[in-house]
């Protein structure tokens, strides 16, 4: 698999989307080999690193195997999360309140920042959540709260549901 610092993904090497089928991957693999191999194109081997035959073969090996592909996708997602990127349309990382750690002593929910790794960079109090519930339409199926890391510019969109006491 490619390293986390490699900016060219296997998907880019083959020119396929993240949700491409196995058939699409196979087709793209054959096309890339034909358009990149000097014996097939009649052009001298002046191939850019991103279209190197070995990279094409490695990309196909990973993306055509469901287990390797799932591992690779997880690695990509973790790498993107460390860089502060998530796949949501508004540009904010989305988390559930269930992913936070609840401290029953002081009634705080905390989460270490996924970007800067600040310990308890995100803190939510019961009061903050209660205020948000009373300020919004209680007919919704859940609520969202925007919160910024106390140590960096990372913002999260936190989803939570109300308990029976607030309905």
Image (cartoon, rainbow, N blue to C red):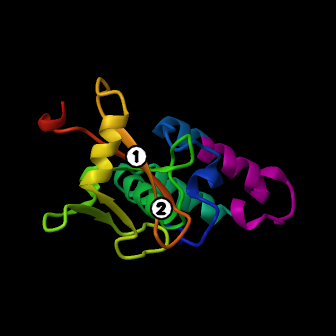
Alpha carbon separation for disc pair 2 and 1: 19 Å
In the figure, residue 26 lies in which quadrant? top right
User: Start and end of the magenta stretch?
Assistant: 28-51
Q: Which SS does the magenta portion mostly show?
A: helix
Rendered location of residue 166, percent (x, y) = 18, 35
Q: Nearer the viewer, residue 96 or 65?
A: 96
Q: Nearer the viewer, residue 30 or 79?
A: 79
- Identify the residue at image location x=36%, y=76%: 119
Q: Which residue is mark 2?
A: 81
Estimate how packed mark 2 is, as few (under 14), some (14 to 19) or many (20 or more) residues with alpha carbons within 10 Å.
some
Q: Earlier in the sequence, mark 2 or mark 1?
A: 2
Instruction: Please name which of the two marks, 2 or 1, marks the residue nearer to the observer.
Output: 1
Rendered location of residue 63, percent (x, y) = 48, 51
Q: Nearer the viewer, residue 73 or 88?
A: 88
Disc ID at residue 145: 1
**Which residue ends up furthest to the top in the rendered image?**
139
Q: Are marks 2 and 1 in contact (CB under 8 Å)?
A: no
- Identify the residue at image location x=29%, y=23%: 139
Secondary element at image label 1 = strand
């Amino acid at each position: 698999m490619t390293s986390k610092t490699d900016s060219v993904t296997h998907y880019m090497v083959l020119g396929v989307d993240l949700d491409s089928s196995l058939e699409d991957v196979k087709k793209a693999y054959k096309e890339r080999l034909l358009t990149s191999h000097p014996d097939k194109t009649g052009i001298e081997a002046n191939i850019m690193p991103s279209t190197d035959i070995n990279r094409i073969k490695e990309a196909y090996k990973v993306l055509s195997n469901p287990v390797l592909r799932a591992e690779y996708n997880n690695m990509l997602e973790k790498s993107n999360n460390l860089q502060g990127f998530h796949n949501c349309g508004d540009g904010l990382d989305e988390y559930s309140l269930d992913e936070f750690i609840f401290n029953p002593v002081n009634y705080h929910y905390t989460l270490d920042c996924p970007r800067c790794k600040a310990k308890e960079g995100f803190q939510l109090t019961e009061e903050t959540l209660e205020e948000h519930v009373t300020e919004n339409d209680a007919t919704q199926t859940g609520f969202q709260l925007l919160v910024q890391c106390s140590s960096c510019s990372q913002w999260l969109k936190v989803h939570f549901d109300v308990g029976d006491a607030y309905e």
